[in-house]
Image: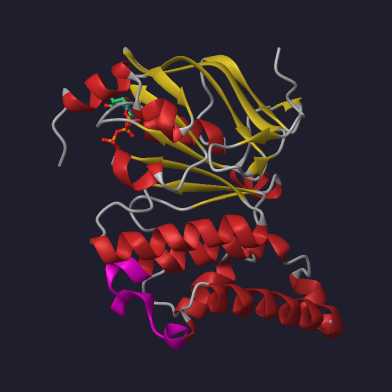
Amino acid sequence: MLDQSAEILTQDGRTIGGVVMEMKHITLRFGGVEAIKNISFDIREGEIRAIIGPNGAGKSSMLNVISGFYVPQEGEVWFHGKKRKPLRPYEVARQGIARTFQNIALFEGMSVLDNVMTGRLNHMSANLFQQAFWKGRAEAEEVENREKVEEIIDFLEIQAIRKTPVARLPYGLKKRVELARALAAEPKLLLLDEPMAGMNVEEKEDMSRFILDVNDEFGTTIALIEHDMGVVMDLSDRVVVMDYGKKIGDGTPDEVRSNQEVIDAYLGVAHD
Ligand SMILES: Nc1ncnc2c1ncn2[C@@H]1O[C@H](COP(=O)(O)OP(=O)(O)OP(=O)(O)O)[C@@H](O)[C@H]1O
């Protein structure tokens, strides 16, 4: 059996670390619909792991299992070597998991800066009493949080719009602000829900570059779901392919690309 803690080499010669999350025989049902059927795979430290598949394949359901939002009826999720119990939303953040959403979930009336600041909530320990009576601590924390947020804003090249209300931004930039907010939490595992959906070619190229840069610069482990096979192939170290709730492929982009079952699933399904 493969040593789970051992590093492995990717097809591009990158080294990725040991297993951080393991999905073991996951089955998820909504009433009579089996959205995920007995799927197992792992996510390794420092990798970009994509889960792809045609419409209705079960990708969103899987992302929600990874994030802890859905608890599967069967199977186990292991995180950092421990079997995970059902989590409350704040516990997910404390575990070092942050995510973006397919339908952007930002505060439209607030500025970019304030939206990104909300990503720091988990790093704010000063309570209301301390904020009122122990100004020093609350202020020090505020300075530290601002510094981190400014660093991320620079990194994602959104300085010019830091004071702009999100509602005024084009779609591609909103997606980048969402990425910034997720990064502000300094996650160990970053989950991206169709990060390229609805983008034009240029926006997709920008987003790909930022995802690669985040992974490279911060060493963040990234798991993303994507509907369009093309966009993630150059980006990912390893890819899981789902179809009708089943896993039909799992491997390097080259392995997945030459997998006949994967080719058939994609050819047999109409895409938008
Ligand atoms: N909350 C829910 N209640 C009932 N059925 C659901 C629910 N969420 C998903 N499903 C069903 O589970 C199956 C998988 O859906 P899911 O959204 O996970 O697929 P997907 O691969 O993300 O699809 P898409 O690419 O279209 O977003 C579908 O048959 C869907 O109708």
Give how far across and how far down residue 218 sits, in percent: 66, 60
Residue situated in front as seen by the camera: 13 or 99: 13
- Is 113 displayed left or right of 142 in the figure? left
- Colouring mode (rainbow / by chain / secondary structure / one colour): secondary structure
Residue situated in front as seen by the camera: 225 or 28: 225
Q: Can I make out residue 130 in this image?
A: yes
Residue under the point 77% across and 29% down: 5
Give how far across and how far down residue 98 sits, in percent: 57, 51
- Is 11 displayed left or right of 269 in the figure? right
The quarter of the image holding the N terminus is top right
Q: Taking 50 as reference, is 148 above or below it?
A: below
Give how far across and how far down residue 79 sits, in percent: 69, 32
Q: Taking 76 as reference, is 46 above or below it?
A: below
Q: Which quarter of the picture shows residue 40?
A: top right
Image quadrant of ligand 1 equals top left
Q: Is residue 78 magenta?
A: no
Residue under the point 67% across and 33% down: 8
Residue under the point 31% across and 22% down: 262
Residue situated in front as seen by the camera: 97 or 210: 210
Q: Is residue 172 magenta?
A: yes
Residue situated in front as seen by the camera: 107 or 201: 201
For the record, the magenta segment spans 160-173
Give how far across and how far down residue 188 sits, in percent: 67, 49
The quarter of the image holding the C terminus is top left
Q: Can I make out residue 227 in this image?
A: no
Q: Which quarter of the picture shows residue 229?
A: top left
Q: How many marks?
A: 0
